[in-house]
Image (cartoon, rainbow, N blue to C red):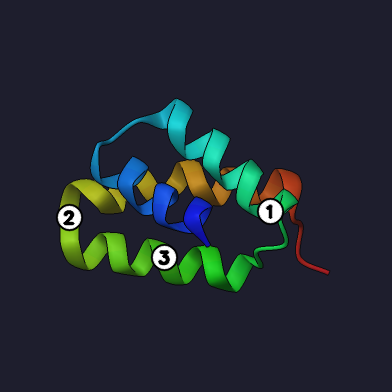
Amino acid sequence: FKEIICIVASILKPCQECMVYHTKQALSLGATREEIMEACSVAIVMGGGPAVSSIAVIQDCLEAWAPRS
């Protein structure tokens, strides 16, 4: 779950390259879309409006690497 924590930190930074890297790593280690989006919700609570705009990067990664079935 460290990668999920890193996703939140990347959103709050914000660091687009970090968001992409940690999302890919989290998925490869078995994290689900739901777990990653829950982490994004926490980042929004902590980071407010600026964090919301960063979530699109995570969503793009999820669409590319973990499409909905």
Label 2 sits on residue: 47
- Residue at 29% x, 53% y is 52
Tell me the quarter of the picture where residue 39 sits: bottom left
Mark 3 surroundings within 10 Å by alpha-carbon count, few (fewer than 14), some (14 through 19), many (20 or more): some
What's the CA distance linking mark 1 and mark 3? 13 Å
Quadrant of the rendering where the C terminus is positioned? bottom right
**Would residue 1 appear left or right of 9 to someone viewing this image?**
right
Above or below for 39 versus 10: below
Label 3 sits on residue: 39
- Residue at 72% x, 62% y is 30
What's the CA distance linking mark 2 and mark 3? 12 Å
Q: Which amino acid, mark 1?
A: Leu
Give the structural element (helix, strand or loop) at label 2. Answer: helix
The front one of 29 and 45 is 29
Please name which of the two marks, 1 or 2, marks the residue nearer to the observer.
Answer: 1
- Residue at 29% x, 60% y is 43
- Residue at 65% x, 63% y is 31
Q: Are marks 1 and 3 in contact (CB under 8 Å)?
A: no
The front one of 54 and 39 is 39
Give the structural element (helix, strand or loop) at label 1. Answer: helix
Label 1 sits on residue: 27
Residue situated furthest front in the rendering: 2
Q: Which amino acid, mark 2?
A: Gly
Q: Which of the two discs, 1 and 3, labels the residue nearer the N terminus?
A: 1
